[in-house]
Image (spheres, helix red, strand yellow):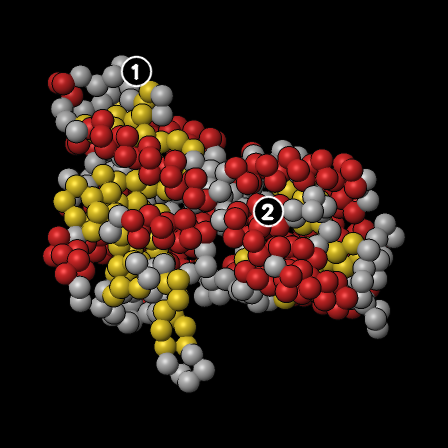
Amino acid sequence: MTTTQQDRYDHGYDFVVVANRLAVDRVTDEDGTTGWRRSPGGLVTALAPVMAESDGAWVGWHGAADEQLEPFDHADMHLVPVPLSGQEVEDYYEGFANATLWPLYHDVIARPEFHRHWFEAYRRVNRRFAEAAAAVAAEAATVWVQDYQLQLVPQMLRELRPDVTIGFFNHIPFPPPGLFSQLPWRHSVLRGVLGADLIGFQRESDARNFQQAVRHRLGHYIKSDRIHVPADSRATDEGSPLVGFDADPSRGTAARRLSAPTAEDGEHHIAEARAFPISIDTQKIVELAERPDIIARSQQIRRELGDPETVFLGVDRLDYTKGIRHRMKGYEELLQDGDLSVGQACLVQVASPSREGVESYRVLREEIEGTVGRINGEFDTLAHTAIRYLHHSYPVEEMVALYLAADVMLVTALRDGMNLVAKEYVAARKSGTGVLVLSEFTGAADQMRQALLINPHDVDELKAAMVTAATMDPAEARRRMRSLRRQVVSNNVQRWARDFLGRLADLKAAAR
Ligand code: F6P
């Protein structure tokens, strides 16, 4: 170990990221030896340079149950694995995070399940993450907590380490107060998140929903995105949230506080809640899209599909929020109506495996695969297929080849925090060709106004958009694509991280 490494181990790290998943994936070589590889996702890509510059540590679960690993260093990052038992994977990850919060925060597209023992596991695991972060953070460090799996961590960490500055970013939507109110542990969750100094959301409307929930449930004073959080309302245990405020404890609904707290109201901190829309590593996608081997691969993909006039593409985690069924229904009807025909058109659907331990995901997989089988059975010819369905994850090189091969990208999510696939497709289309059909229920739709925006519940509108996209005048397509690309080129994920961390640094300086 070098002196600098020893020093960091002794004094802690100035910048700590806390996320459900560690920033590395375990890989096994051909000879059977295992090692770690940096995860390919945008978050890791954006934060890796910050980690390298500022003595960074990343706290997260390494993805295997019942395994305790020592902290280790990998590619300029100090990694702190947080262990989860098999039971905790079921109750905290598959249960509370992905069968309670995920459907609740995505407009209850699936029915959220509320189980007290799931929330107990969520609280216990969140505390473990908070303790791990508290143990590695240097004096006055900056700690950035990520996403809905860890909403109690900011407040737990504030209690353990009042000296650190805390950011929190919610990658998924924050639901309207009426839906959020269903959560039996709504006060705990709000108080947990409010432990942060800066709270980031994907869209303005998510930030507004959060502020409304805070105002309505806790009665905190809010002005210009700044929430005054009294110290005596901070505990993350459920119970009366209303101490010190004019409220109706019997209903658990706090009255809105109309004036700013005074010294008599006691100690408080400010939590600022606003939108920081995330993006992609645009440069990386652009570079890959220019690589001759990837261009050649995209041409090969089209040939293998039988050189159709129009390749429609869908790329999603196999998740009920993504509107894959709606897309297939629209496509099937277009084939039935004769507006599209097999051979002339082909739909490539990449559905990467996801959360297979959760019942609603298993049911969805059966439904989707049944639908694909039925549509292909009815419309395939010996030479051509209607839907090429791929239940795999692919490396980014293959994804970019697919983006280059696709004439029309279909993003039909029923609700999506952002949707980075839409941005990646646009980044890859430097030629200016290609059309993006985009659900208005994605965060991306707030920024990508030149896409063909659709309501995926309206099958006729979706079908019309698919036909318009397939037949769009090339000059019109180029004009739209140019405008979309400007947005994605000037707002990359590096800028997102800079904006968030810059604002957090300002708040830190102002609080001194
Ligand atoms: O969108 C939220 C998110 O947690 C992403 O950060 C992640 O890529 C995706 O969902 C899949 O999450 P997981 O496989 O960890 O459940």
Residue occupied by mark 1? 258
Can the viewer see residue 466 in this picture?
yes
Q: Name the spot of residue 231 as percent of width and height, x first.
A: 17, 31
Q: Residue at x 67, y 40 (%)?
A: 481
What's the amino acid at mark 2? Ala
Q: Name the spot of residue 250 as percent of width and height, x first.
A: 27, 30
Measured Cα–Cα span from mark 1 to mark 2: 46 Å
Spot the residue most to the right: 338
Nearest the camera: 299 or 321? 299
- Mark 2: which secondary structure? helix
Quarter of the image where ligand 1 sits? bottom left
Q: Where is 277 relative to 85, above or below?
A: above
Image position of 173 (left or right of 289): left
Circle 1 packing at 10 Å, graded few (<14), some (14-19), many (20+), is few
Q: Name the spot of residue 207 as percent of width and height, x first.
A: 42, 32
Q: Earlier in the sequence, mark 1 or mark 2?
A: 1
Labels 1 & 2 near each other (Cβ < 8 A): no
Image position of 426 (left or right of 28): right
Nearest the camera: 78 or 389? 78
What's the amino acid at mark 1? Leu
Residue occupied by mark 2? 427
